[in-house]
Image (tube, rainbow, N blue to C red):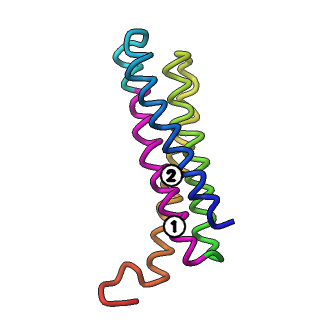
Amino acid sequence: MPSVFLFLGALNAFIAVGMGAFGAHGLKAILSQELLSVYQTGVTYHMWHALGLISIGFIRQQTPDSRLLRCAGWLMFMGIILFPGSLYLLSILNIRWLGIITPFGGLAFLTAWLLLTFFAARNNLALPGKK
Protein backbone atom coordinates (compact mmCIF):
# COMPACT_ATOMS: atom_id res chain seq x y z
CA MET A 1 0.00 0.00 0.00
CA PRO A 2 2.81 2.55 0.64
CA SER A 3 3.74 2.55 -3.05
CA VAL A 4 0.25 3.63 -4.18
CA PHE A 5 1.33 7.27 -3.95
CA LEU A 6 4.50 6.60 -5.91
CA PHE A 7 2.32 4.99 -8.61
CA LEU A 8 -0.30 7.79 -8.56
CA GLY A 9 2.42 10.44 -8.61
CA ALA A 10 4.22 8.90 -11.57
CA LEU A 11 0.94 8.42 -13.43
CA ASN A 12 -0.07 12.02 -12.77
CA ALA A 13 3.34 13.33 -13.85
CA PHE A 14 2.83 11.44 -17.12
CA ILE A 15 -0.66 12.92 -17.50
CA ALA A 16 0.60 16.44 -16.66
CA VAL A 17 3.26 16.23 -19.38
CA GLY A 18 0.63 15.03 -21.84
CA MET A 19 -1.78 17.79 -20.86
CA GLY A 20 1.01 20.36 -21.20
CA ALA A 21 1.87 19.13 -24.68
CA PHE A 22 -1.80 19.05 -25.65
CA GLY A 23 -2.23 22.62 -24.45
CA ALA A 24 0.88 23.89 -26.19
CA HIS A 25 0.22 22.18 -29.51
CA GLY A 26 -3.48 21.36 -29.69
CA LEU A 27 -5.16 24.20 -27.85
CA LYS A 28 -2.91 27.17 -28.60
CA ALA A 29 -4.83 28.08 -31.75
CA ILE A 30 -8.24 27.30 -30.28
CA LEU A 31 -8.33 28.89 -26.81
CA SER A 32 -8.20 32.58 -25.97
CA GLN A 33 -5.04 33.75 -24.21
CA GLU A 34 -7.01 34.01 -20.96
CA LEU A 35 -8.29 30.42 -21.13
CA LEU A 36 -4.89 29.14 -22.24
CA SER A 37 -3.40 30.78 -19.15
CA VAL A 38 -6.01 29.05 -16.97
CA TYR A 39 -5.16 25.74 -18.63
CA GLN A 40 -1.43 26.30 -18.10
CA THR A 41 -2.04 27.02 -14.41
CA GLY A 42 -3.71 23.61 -14.20
CA VAL A 43 -0.70 21.94 -15.85
CA THR A 44 1.73 23.67 -13.48
CA TYR A 45 -0.16 22.69 -10.33
CA HIS A 46 -0.73 19.21 -11.72
CA MET A 47 3.01 18.59 -12.18
CA TRP A 48 4.09 20.07 -8.85
CA HIS A 49 1.59 17.96 -6.97
CA ALA A 50 2.43 14.84 -8.94
CA LEU A 51 5.99 15.37 -7.67
CA GLY A 52 4.55 15.88 -4.19
CA LEU A 53 2.78 12.52 -4.45
CA ILE A 54 6.00 10.85 -5.59
CA SER A 55 7.77 12.37 -2.57
CA ILE A 56 5.09 11.10 -0.22
CA GLY A 57 5.40 7.67 -1.84
CA PHE A 58 9.15 7.58 -1.18
CA ILE A 59 8.78 8.82 2.40
CA ARG A 60 6.07 6.23 3.08
CA GLN A 61 8.47 3.47 2.08
CA GLN A 62 10.42 4.40 5.23
CA THR A 63 7.37 4.91 7.45
CA PRO A 64 4.53 2.86 5.93
CA ASP A 65 2.25 3.14 8.97
CA SER A 66 2.13 6.94 9.10
CA ARG A 67 -1.45 8.13 9.13
CA LEU A 68 -0.32 11.71 8.46
CA LEU A 69 1.42 10.65 5.25
CA ARG A 70 -1.49 8.50 4.13
CA CYS A 71 -3.94 11.38 4.63
CA ALA A 72 -1.55 13.84 2.96
CA GLY A 73 -1.22 11.56 -0.06
CA TRP A 74 -4.95 11.09 -0.54
CA LEU A 75 -5.61 14.82 -0.07
CA MET A 76 -2.94 15.66 -2.63
CA PHE A 77 -4.48 13.19 -5.08
CA MET A 78 -7.96 14.65 -4.48
CA GLY A 79 -6.49 18.12 -4.97
CA ILE A 80 -5.12 17.08 -8.36
CA ILE A 81 -8.55 15.89 -9.44
CA LEU A 82 -10.29 19.03 -8.20
CA PHE A 83 -7.81 21.83 -8.88
CA PRO A 84 -6.17 21.12 -12.24
CA GLY A 85 -9.11 18.96 -13.26
CA SER A 86 -11.55 21.83 -12.88
CA LEU A 87 -9.17 24.23 -14.63
CA TYR A 88 -8.76 21.86 -17.58
CA LEU A 89 -12.52 21.50 -17.96
CA LEU A 90 -13.17 25.21 -17.39
CA SER A 91 -10.71 26.25 -20.08
CA ILE A 92 -11.53 23.59 -22.69
CA LEU A 93 -15.31 23.73 -22.27
CA ASN A 94 -15.45 27.43 -21.26
CA ILE A 95 -17.86 26.61 -18.44
CA ARG A 96 -17.17 29.34 -15.89
CA TRP A 97 -19.10 27.80 -12.99
CA LEU A 98 -16.49 25.03 -12.82
CA GLY A 99 -14.26 27.64 -11.17
CA ILE A 100 -16.31 27.09 -8.00
CA ILE A 101 -14.67 23.66 -7.63
CA THR A 102 -11.08 24.89 -7.94
CA PRO A 103 -10.71 26.34 -4.39
CA PHE A 104 -11.67 22.96 -2.89
CA GLY A 105 -8.70 21.46 -4.71
CA GLY A 106 -6.51 24.26 -3.41
CA LEU A 107 -7.71 23.58 0.12
CA ALA A 108 -6.89 19.89 -0.32
CA PHE A 109 -3.39 20.85 -1.52
CA LEU A 110 -2.83 23.18 1.43
CA THR A 111 -4.01 20.58 3.92
CA ALA A 112 -1.80 17.90 2.36
CA TRP A 113 1.28 20.12 2.60
CA LEU A 114 0.39 21.04 6.19
CA LEU A 115 0.09 17.36 7.13
CA LEU A 116 3.46 16.72 5.51
CA THR A 117 4.87 19.58 7.60
CA PHE A 118 3.39 18.04 10.78
CA PHE A 119 4.92 14.69 9.81
CA ALA A 120 8.35 16.31 9.37
CA ALA A 121 8.07 18.17 12.69
CA ARG A 122 6.85 15.10 14.54
CA ASN A 123 9.77 13.09 13.21
CA ASN A 124 12.29 15.87 13.91
CA LEU A 125 13.07 16.08 10.20
CA ALA A 126 12.92 19.87 10.25
CA LEU A 127 15.43 20.33 13.06
CA PRO A 128 19.12 20.61 12.13
CA GLY A 129 21.31 18.07 13.89
CA LYS A 130 18.33 15.92 14.94
CA LYS A 131 17.63 12.48 13.65
Left or right, residue 82 beside residue 21: right
User: Residue 31, how many percent across, how many down?
Assistant: 42, 13
Q: Mark 1 points at which residue?
A: 58
**Image point 44% across, 16% down: which residue?**
26
Image point (60%, 54%), residue name: 7
Q: What is the x, y in percent for residue 60?
A: 57, 71
- The front one of 59 and 122 is 59
65 on left or right of 9: right
What amino acid type should be assigned to the residue bearing mark 2?
A: Phe
Measuring 56% from the left and 16% from the top, which residue is drawn there? 93
Q: Can you say whether 47 is above or below 74 in the image?
A: above
Q: Mark 2 points at which residue?
A: 109
Q: Do the residues labelled 2 and 1 touch (CB within 8 Å)?
A: no
The region drawn magenta spans 38-63
Residue 117 lies in what quarter of the image?
bottom left
Determine if the magenta segment contains residue 58: yes
